[in-house]
Amino acid sequence: MFLIDDIILAPVRGLFWVFKEIRDAAEEEQANAAEDITAKLSELYMMLETGQMTEAEFDAEEKALLDRLDAIKEREDSEEEEEDDEEVVIRKRRPKKRAKL
């Protein structure tokens, strides 16, 4: 009986595995994007200090990079809030154990 269940559920489990891998890849890409932005900011500061860039150019590029970084942070925060909300809903759905009298 359990073998038949495993055979029938194999495609569904495979699909869940694929979705999990996609989610993990997206999270990793998002983390790498934040690191890339901070590296670019460091390069901008160095270019400003060495005189390769004017103050106006620096301000414009810095604002664009900081906006992108803020968007990434907001996305991460909203995902964490959604996970917390889901956990609360799951806890509310669980029936409470009643003591036997």
Image (tube, helix red, strand yellow):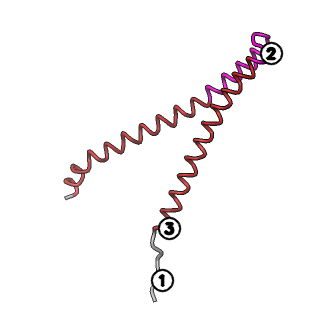
Viewport quadrant of the N terminus: bottom left
**Is residue 15 positioned above or below 4 on the image?**
above
Mark 1–mark 2 distance (CA, rounded to whole Å): 71 Å
Q: Say which residue label 3 marks.
A: 92
Q: Say which residue label 2 marks.
A: 49
Looking at the rendered structure, the kind of residue marked 1 is Ala
**What residue is at 21 percent from the left and 49 percent from the top?**
7
Looking at the rendered structure, the kind of residue marked 2 is Glu
Position of 40 with respect to 23 (left or right) is right
Of mark 2 and mark 3, the one earlier in the sequence is 2
Residue 17: x and y, percent? 36, 42
Q: Say which residue label 1 marks.
A: 99
Q: What SS does tag 2 mark? A: helix
Looking at the rendered structure, the kind of residue marked 3 is Lys
Mark 3–mark 1 distance (CA, rounded to whole Å): 19 Å
Which residue occupies the foreground of this view, 14 or 36? 36
Position of 71 with respect to 3 (left or right) is right
Q: What SS does tag 3 mark? A: helix
Of mark 1 and mark 2, the one earlier in the sequence is 2
Residue 63: x and y, percent? 70, 27
Name the mark nearer the viewer: 1 or 2.
2
Position of 75 with respect to 24 (left or right) is right
Segment tinted magenta in the rendering? 35-56
Which residue occupies the foreground of this view, 16 or 62? 62
